[in-house]
Image: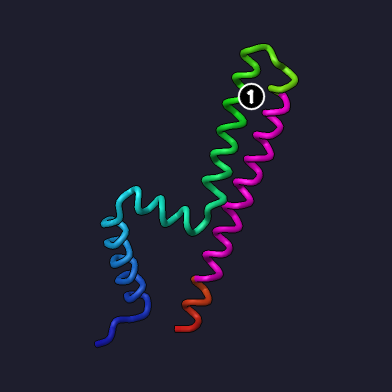
Amino acid sequence: MEPEPKDLDWIQLREEMGKSQAETQSDKFARKFKENPFVPIGCLATVGALSYGLWCFRRGKSKMSQTMMRLRIVAQGFTVVALVSGVVITTGKNLNKNSSQ
């Protein structure tokens, strides 16, 4: 008796989970960074703008602090757009891969 397609999905999922558990954190970060490098760059830009903006606020440089908070919003938007576009691209690749099989 052959397994149903639904059963094959579970088997494939278990195999993929087994592979991901053998992957170290640094390997996973490197793989994810190669897949979509704009997300970590956006996160770093957000943290940098926030940190510098808070430092300026503490020093009494309110104009620069406001500028950095606006830059932080732009960096956050960039990060969200990069994240969503990465998901869309990955989904498209997976759909093309599955349709060719």
Quadrant of the frame with the N terminus: bottom left
Which quadrant of the figure has residue 47?
Answer: top right
Answer above or below: position of 1 versus 87: below
Count of numbered tags: 1
Q: Residues within 10 Å of mark 1 (few under 14, many from 20)?
A: many
Residue at 35 percent of width and 48 percent of height: 26
Whether residue 90 appears in magenta in the rendering, the answer is yes
Q: Position of residue 71 (x, y in %)?
A: 69, 34
Which residue corresponds to mark 1?
53
Q: What residue occupies the far bottom of the structure in this picture?
A: 1
The residue closer to the viewer here, 68 or 90, is 68
Whether residue 21 appears in magenta in the rendering, the answer is no
Residue at 60 percent of width and 46 percent of height: 79
* Badge 1 element: helix
Q: Is residue 18 left or right of residue 49?
A: left
The residue closer to the viewer here, 99 or 82, is 82
Q: Position of residue 67 (x, y in %)?
A: 72, 27
Answer above or below: position of 100 versus 46: below
Residue at 57 percent of width and 32 percent of height: 48
Q: Position of residue 97 (x, y in %)?
A: 48, 77
Magenta region: 66-93
Residue at 64 percent of width and 40 percent of height: 75
